[in-house]
Amino acid sequence: ALYNSMTDLPLRSYDYIIVGGGTAGGVLGRRLTEDGSKNVLVIEAGANPDDIIETQIPFYATKNFFTKRDWNFTTVSQAGLNGRAVTINAGRMLGGSSSMTQMVWIRGGKDDYDLWATVTGDSGWSWDALLPYMKKIEHFSADNPDNSVDMVSTYHGTNGPLGITIDAWSYPSDPHIINATVELASEFPFNPDVSSGNELGMGWSPSTIENGARSSSWTHYLRPVINRTNLDVVINTHVTRLLQTGTDGDKPVFRGVEYATSVPSSNRNVINATHEVILSAGAIMSPQILMLSGIGSRSTLSGLGIQTIVDNPEVGQHFHDHPRFASIYTVADDVPTMDIYIQNATLEAEALAQWKVDRTGPLVAGGPKQMSFSRNPTDIAPFNTSQDPSSGPTCGHYQLAFADQFASEQTTVSSGRYLTIITNAISQASYGNITIGSASPFDPPLINPNFLGEYYDVATLREGVKASQRLASSKSMTDNFVMSPFGNLVQALDQGDEAIESLARSESTTTWQPMGSTRMTRAGGTDGVLDPTLKVFGTVGLRVVDAGAFPHGPAASSQAPVYILAERAADLIKADAP
Ligand SMILES: Cc1cc2nc3c(=O)[nH]c(=O)nc-3n(C[C@H](O)[C@H](O)[C@H](O)COP(=O)(O)OP(=O)(O)OC[C@H]3O[C@@H](n4cnc5c(N)ncnc54)[C@H](O)[C@@H]3O)c2cc1C
């Protein structure tokens, strides 16, 4: 059942306590309770988003920003971004970030997961071994909209919990982009399924949308099973740290969970799991909770008066995110881009009324509907001398995604029609870290993704911007559609590489994909935090299952990889059950 506070919980013991009812936490809550033999408690800091229409309407995804459903994190000053600090929004509600994503559903390349297997020494993390889990997640309900290919049968599942479809709204850009895959077939070859293991090329991009509304790990994994008698979910409860409950051999056992309400001054109480505590608080908060619990770098912890129980300087390291740059183009005045619903309150109100009636109309428009994945050229600087940061040849270095609207975080406009082509550096070379500057669980951790810290990533964005321009200036795109580049992009494209790189430093921001801060490595490894079964090194009774656990960030948006990781994690946890 769902409870508003810990004081409402029935008096019973829990085999598993999951910290964070987000993307991974929702998957675990469902899977660990499905055979009925184990009691599970999920503790979530945020609230239940069921009454919040902005978490349901695909087009309203960004309206969740800066609300109480958003952790609203800010990075430390980023040297690679000319010293700017960047906001990283993250979901603080049931479903976590899956309740506020742009809904893009993309897995990454086969090499991404094969690298996980190599790094961990566990072939269970390879693409082939994970493909059944990938399918197990999906309730995939659309063929490719142009019917040229069946996206479902070979690589996708149709009986899983999570509703996934190709966005039902027809964007003005759709035919132009698909035509460009013919006109520019050598650079943007049509890829019938970018989630087949080879993501390179341009193809349709499915979204976590079903029947015109967002599907999240709350709406499609956890909520449908909330009445299981062995599942309790409690909201509005902030886990402040984990507590050692004993020792097993020479290792500390961490089965105690200390919590408070969302009010920092509220009392701390403790609940113990009989078997395991699983941290699924996301790649920013899970390392913070570990450090507050005495698991981390001794020098950091002792400086803050926290007793070190497990000295592991790897906690919080290898943190990264994919930097993003938006190239904006003007579009012919008579093209009905989504700008009309942003600029005209009457049209938006009509669209909202239509959505409320039957979940149709323009507001079902979610994230990008096509995507392309490309590799950097190998014959120019810095790529001809740098080590390739990608997992392998099935993975792109940059991803282009399209929005039929003005989509900038720097400026807004009140008129005009636009196409935004977003470059994401999905195989970035820069790594940063998460650490803590305070012993208070209510102070956010210090977040350093080190955006564009390596010149390689600036150059990757440069390549993406130039590829966007080649695409935007093609006959297919300029045929009654794209007019010209907009804003600072005009001058940068005119002036060339250095100017583009400089613009990338002054305008790039996050794709909201924090990853890798508690990474998994091989058993007994010293270059990570988790063993291949996601157990925290040096402890008993404790795992981390969230985006922080990725051994290497996939060349993709991160929600699908989190669902994939969590599905296998559930089986690994069950396999260890007493
Ligand atoms: C705005 C936005 C857009 C995105 N767009 C896309 C996209 O289009 N496609 C894509 O693939 N990915 C996207 N992502 C990234 C993707 O959503 C995340 O990588 C993924 O959902 C992370 O899953 P997680 O389980 O690691 O963490 P989360 O889903 O963030 O879950 C963490 C949960 O833990 C809770 N929590 C944290 N601390 C505590 C605590 N101390 N006590 C109790 N509970 C706590 C949080 O409230 C949250 O519910 C986007 C993310 C955001 C924020």
Image (tube, rainbow, N blue to C red):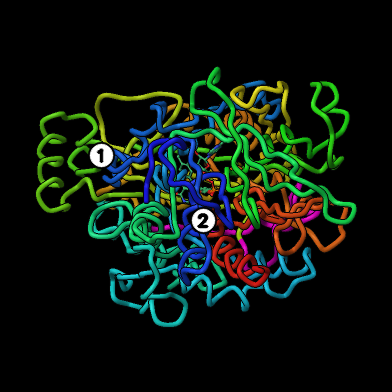
Query: Is residue 432 a member of the stretch shown in magenta?
Result: no
Question: Relative to 562, is 103 on the left or the right?
Answer: left
Q: Which residue is mark 1?
A: 51
Q: Which residue is outermost to the front?
A: 11
Task: Quadrant for residue 152, please give it.
Answer: bottom left
Across the whole image, how many numbered discs are drawn on residues? 2
Label 2 CB, ligand 1: below 8 Å? no
User: Magenta span: helix, strand or loop, mainly?
Assistant: loop
Q: Position of residue 398 (x, y in %)?
A: 58, 52
Q: Residues within 10 Å of mark 1 (few under 14, many from 20)?
A: few
Q: Residues within 10 Å of mark 2 (few under 14, many from 20)?
A: many
Q: Which residue is outermost to the bottom?
A: 154
Find numbered disc 2 in the image and state the secondary structure of the residue it sits on: strand
Asked whether the residues under the numbered discs 2 and 1 touch, taking CB atoms below 8 Å apart as contact, a structural biologist would say: no
Q: Which residue is mark 2?
A: 40
Q: Quadrant of the C terminus?
A: bottom right
Question: Relative to 82, is 155 on the left or the right?
Answer: left
CA distance for labels 2 and 1: 25 Å
Q: Which residues are magenta?
A: 370-395
Find numbered disc 1 in the image and state the secondary structure of the residue it sits on: helix
Please state which amino acid type lies under the numbered disc 2: Val
Q: Measuring 47% from the left and 54% from the top, which residue is drawn there?
A: 26
| Residue nearest the observer in this picture, 466 or 300 | 300
Q: Which residue is outermost to the top?
A: 265
| Residue nearest the observer in this picture, 275 or 446 | 275
